[in-house]
Amino acid sequence: MIKAGIVGGTGYTGVELLRLLALHPGVAVHAVTSRSDAGKRVDAVYPNLRGHIDKVFVEPELNSLSECGVVFFATPNGTAMRMAQALLDKGIKIIDLAADFRLKDGAVWEKWYGEPHACPCLLSEAVYGLPEAQRSAVRNARLLANPGCYPTSVQLALLPLIEAKAIHLDNLVADVKSGASGAGRKAELSLLMSESGESFKAYAVDGHRHLPEIEQELTQAAGMPVGLTFVPHLLPMIRGIHATVYARVKDDTLDFQQLFETRYRDEVFVDVLPAGSHPDTRNVRGSNRCQLAIHRPQQGNALVILSVIDNLVKGAAGQAVQNMNLMFGLPETQGLEAIGLYP
C-alpha cells in the first residue's frame, strides 16, 4: 500500500486528488497539508469526502510527509521547488501538479514565472509526465512534472501529426477554452459568477504561461522548432477544456482519421471519435479521458482537431494518478475507471 501525501489539499486540484485516491485500492492517504485549514478535519472542509477521508489538515512540513512513499504538490507555482530536494533525499517520490519542473531551462522559467528557480539542478532530472508520450520515462521517474491542462489537450491533438511529419510546423494555432475551475479556488472578481456568467472572453493573448511548456514538448516531439499561436479563453462553466487546433497539411494523401486511430489504439484514456464527430466537454466530465475528433474542411489543406478533457482530471489530478500508477508499477488504469458524468 502506497502512503500518499498531498501538499495543498484545499484547492480544486487537491480535493480532486483526494476524491480519486480515496477509492484507489493501492493507496492510503497519509497526510494532507494546508496552512489555512491546519487542525480542521478534511471532511469538514469537503463534506463530499465524509466516510472516505478521516484525516486532519496539517502544516506543510517535512516531518508531516516523511513517512510517505509519494507526495503530490497541488500548490501554487513556486512551492514544490522549495521542498523537492529534502523529500527526494528521504527517498520520497514527487508528483508536482504545478509548473515548477515542467520547463527544462531555468532562465525560461524565471522569465515566465517572475523569480529565479529555487533548485535548477533538478530541472534536467524531472520527467514531463504526459504518459501517452513519455510512458517509459515516467515509469523510472522519482520527480515528475505533471502537464498543465491546456498543454495536455493541445499536445494530444498534435502528437500523431507531428510524429508522422504530416503537417507544416511553422504556423500551428491552438484556440482553447477552459472552465473557471482552471484558475483555481480563489476569490477573484473576474471569476465571480456575476462577472463571468453569460459572458465569454479571451485572455493572456500576448503570452500565457503554458505556451513555453507546449512549445518545449512539441519541439521535442518534432526534433525541430515549432511555431505556435496559443489563445486561451474563459468559459462560463465550472469544468472542462475544449481545444480547437489548426494545422496545414503536408501530405494530402494521408488518411488522418486512420492516423489518429492507429496512434491511440492502445491508449485507454484517449478516445478517437468516429469521423465527423464534434466532442462535448460534458462527455468527459469527471473522467480521465481525452476525446478527439479530426476534420478536414472541404478537403482543403487545413486540418482541424477538436480535443476535450476535464481540466481537473486528465488535465490535473487524474493524470497525476495515472503517472503515480506507472511510477509504482501498478495497472495504469487503477483508480481511474470512472465513466464521464452525463448530463
Image (cartoon, grey):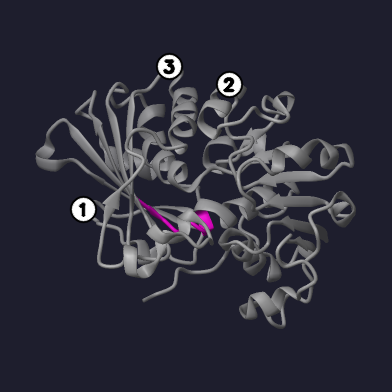
Rendered location of residue 70, percent (x, y): 78, 50
222 and 79: which is toward the camera: 79
Checking the image for residue 12, the label placed there is none
Rendered location of residue 204, percent (x, y): 36, 40
Residue where numbered disc 3 is placed: 224
Residues packed near mark 1 inside 10 Å, few (<14), some (14 to 19) or many (20 plus): few
Rendered residue at 39%/41% (across/down) = 154
321 and 115: which is toward the camera: 115
Rendered residue at 29%/21% (across/down) = 170
Residues packed near mark 3 inside 10 Å, few (<14), some (14 to 19) or many (20 plus): few
Residue where numbered disc 2 is placed: 107
> Identity of the amino acid at label 2?
Ala
Dot 3 or dot 2: first in sequence order is: 2
Q: Is residue 310 magenta?
A: yes
Checking the image for residue 276, the label placed there is 1
Question: What whole-number distance in Å separates the C-alpha atoms at marks 1 and 2?
Answer: 43 Å
Placement of 258 over or under 67, stated as above or below:
above
Placement of 149 over or under 109, stated as above or below:
below
